[in-house]
Amino acid sequence: MNDDYGAKTVNLQTLLKHGFAVPNFYAIASTKIKQSTGANGEWDPVALETEVEAAHKVLCAGSYAVRSSALTEDGKTSSLAGQFKTRLAVQPKDLSEAIQYITSFAHKYLKGHLELFSILIQEYIEADYAGVVFTRNPLGGRELILEYHKGRGEAVVSGQVKPQKLNLYWDEISPALLPDLEKAIQSFKEIERKFEFPQDIEWCIKNGKWFFLQSRPITTLTAKDYEGILYLEKNLPSSPFYFSKTEICEIAERPCPLTLDLLNRIYVKDGPVQRAYQKLGIHYEAQDFLRVLGNELYVDREAELKTLLPAYSYFTTSALMPKWARAKGAWVTFKNLLRLNRLDFPWDNIAEQLKILLEEPIRDLSFEVALENFLKDYELIFTINLGVGFAVKKNLPFPKIYEEIDPQNIPIKNLKGNSLDLADESQFIQAEPSEKQTSFEQYAHLREMGRWLTVKRINELRTAATKQAKKSSKESLAHFFLLDEFLSGNLDIAKAQKRVQGFFIFIS
């Protein structure tokens, strides 16, 4: 194969070379198409008949699939999927017409530049099952996604049917949903390795045999994304795990050591989260569920689940849906499930506390006092977030509470950052709904005020940390010390510098 053939054809040739089952195919080069077509994209009859006879001789098939293989298709940054035409189950007598149809459409789409277009003619297989597989989640996850249904795969690719779907991490065992699925999944993984990039693969099954119809790069992923995926694959534990991004990851995507230490302090035993749940009558068992991988924050969803529902697990089904899994912790799980569906929040008291705390001036505090204030107030902030989420989910009307929290009375002019990240010193964005008429908008406003209190307390904590580090001539390392080091006054510069090196090694 050379530059006269599109990636679809070249990739099939690569699959064939490495021993994967590919339907027999015949390709028409772009130079041949350009030389053999007129101004309107019409084939010269003699040239067309020559190609048809050659295809019959090579394939000897009962029916054909005639596909585009444009030189602009199936690239690493753009697939152009669905932009050209395909003809399936083409009878031998109709092959000339199918080639002309595919060519005419391409001529129009490419504005006459048929030097950018080649054609792929394959032996057509009337499939028992067909579908697509993404060797990695196109949205950036590590898992493999398989979509399938009975019959032709075109219905899946074009969105005409809703396929069955299976999500699997690479170290999971696949359920026996399709013939020889486990073996096929190993082939999908090997195809990714051969192309050295995550692949979008079309496939079909006939009489229990898997055929690979095409393979192309997943264009929503970058080389940097793939590098991160491979890093995680190398460093993740071998036991079952479910690490993912949750809301907490959005507010501290790449936490500095001080921020990560603060996040862990929020979720520990007797911390603000446990106190908030306790006041609502919910048992919370502290778990170590925050993970930093490749310098990015993830949540161990299985460990997080166990904080409230110890009898549940994500690993009872391949869909990673939380289900009852064991007897241990059953009574706590049962009681928490009842309470979580019948929550009652003291909104008047919550709003009154929030109003008082927001209108307090920002203070110059010692690190110990600033940390104490943050952890005490985060109990309220977490309660607000939990309550708003519950109210929106249940579509509850907004209660008659303090709606008169006036931003003009809140000292926010000199605030830095917009989240819980101590290293975030960007300009504070004062997001406020212009009109709070619906319950959703009113709840959103209340939650936004909770965010303001978070940023306010983080500013006091950041100032205290910077001030203490500056006294020891270590201001530049303020974000790389830990909470106990500030509290004890023992700021070990060697440890901080080691954390600096580990933090920046993954930032390109």
Image: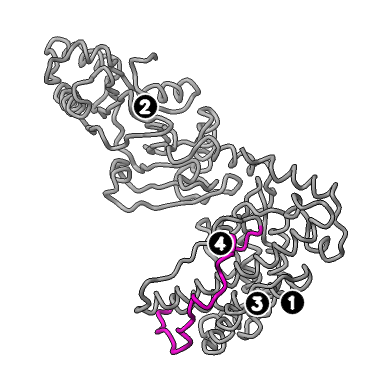
Residue at 16% x, 15% y is 37
Q: CA distance from mark 1 to mark 2?
A: 58 Å
Q: Quadrant of residue 205?
A: top left
Q: Position of residue 273 (x, y in %)?
A: 66, 74
The C terminus, quarter of image: top right
Total count of labels: 4
Q: Position of residue 302 (x, y in %)?
A: 63, 62
Q: Which stretch appears magenta?
A: 394-422
Residue at 13% x, 12% y is 44
In the rendered image, which residue does mark 4 sit on?
A: 418
Q: Quadrant of residue 86?
A: top left
Left or right of 39 in this view: 194: right
Secondary structure at badge 4 equals loop
Type of residue at label 1? Asp
In the rendered image, which residue does mark 2 sit on?
A: 8
Residue at 77% x, 48% y is 499
Type of residue at label 3? Asp
Camera-near label (4 vs 2) is 4
Front residue of 416/138: it is 416
Q: Considering only order in the chain, which callout, 2 or 3, is on the residue closer to the N terminus?
A: 2
Type of residue at label 4? Asn
Type of residue at label 2? Lys
In the rendered image, which residue does mark 3 sit on?
A: 377
Q: Is residue 395 magenta?
A: yes
Camera-near label (1 vs 3) is 3
Label 3 crowding class (10 Å Cα cut-off): few <14, some 14-19, many 20+?
Answer: many
Q: CA distance from mark 1 to mark 3?
A: 14 Å
In the rendered image, which residue does mark 1 sit on?
A: 270
Q: Considering only order in the chain, which callout, 4 or 3, is on the residue closer to the N terminus?
A: 3
